[in-house]
Amino acid sequence: MVSKHKHKPGRLKGLGVKYGATVRKRYGILYKTLKKKRKCPACNSTRFGRVALGIWFCKKCEYKVAAGAYDIDLEKIQSSI
């Protein structure tokens, strides 16, 4: 019996067998961290995300901060507000 639908890797799209399991696992963890929902440190809105490498922006209150490339350390930012 042959399956009609093939499994698509989703967030690991484009990383084939040639990259190896370790690289794919690292990329998966990094991508999941980058795309998770975050709250704005100023207004607590969930419309907070990365605009560019290291630049984070809230669409609601227009709060902009420079922080980590793939993840933002909210503890350091909240202490400076």
Image (cartoon, rainbow, N blue to C red):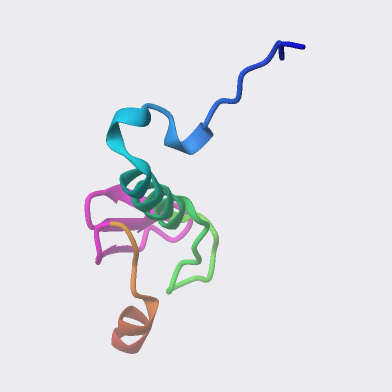
Asked whether 56 falls inside the magenta stretch, the response is: yes
First to last magenta residue range: 49-69
Q: Is residue 3 above or below residue 75?
A: above
Q: Nearer the viewer, residue 80 or 5?
A: 5
Q: Residue at x 38, y 44 (%)?
A: 21
Q: Position of residue 74 (x, y in %)?
A: 38, 76
Q: In this orientation, which residue lies closer to the viewer: 73 or 44?
A: 73
Q: Which residue corresponds to the image point at 52% horizontal and 57% vertical from the top-left? A: 37
Q: Residue at x 41, y 54 (%)?
A: 49
Q: At 45% from the left edge and 50% from the top edge, which residue is drawn?
A: 35
Residue closest to the far front: 1
Viewport quadrant of the C terminus: bottom left
Expressed as whole percent of the image width and height from the top left, the position of residue 57 reads 35, 56
Q: Magenta stretch containing residue 33, yes or no?
A: no
In which image quadrant can residue 65 be found? bottom left
* x and y percentages locating residue 47 in the rendered image: 50, 55
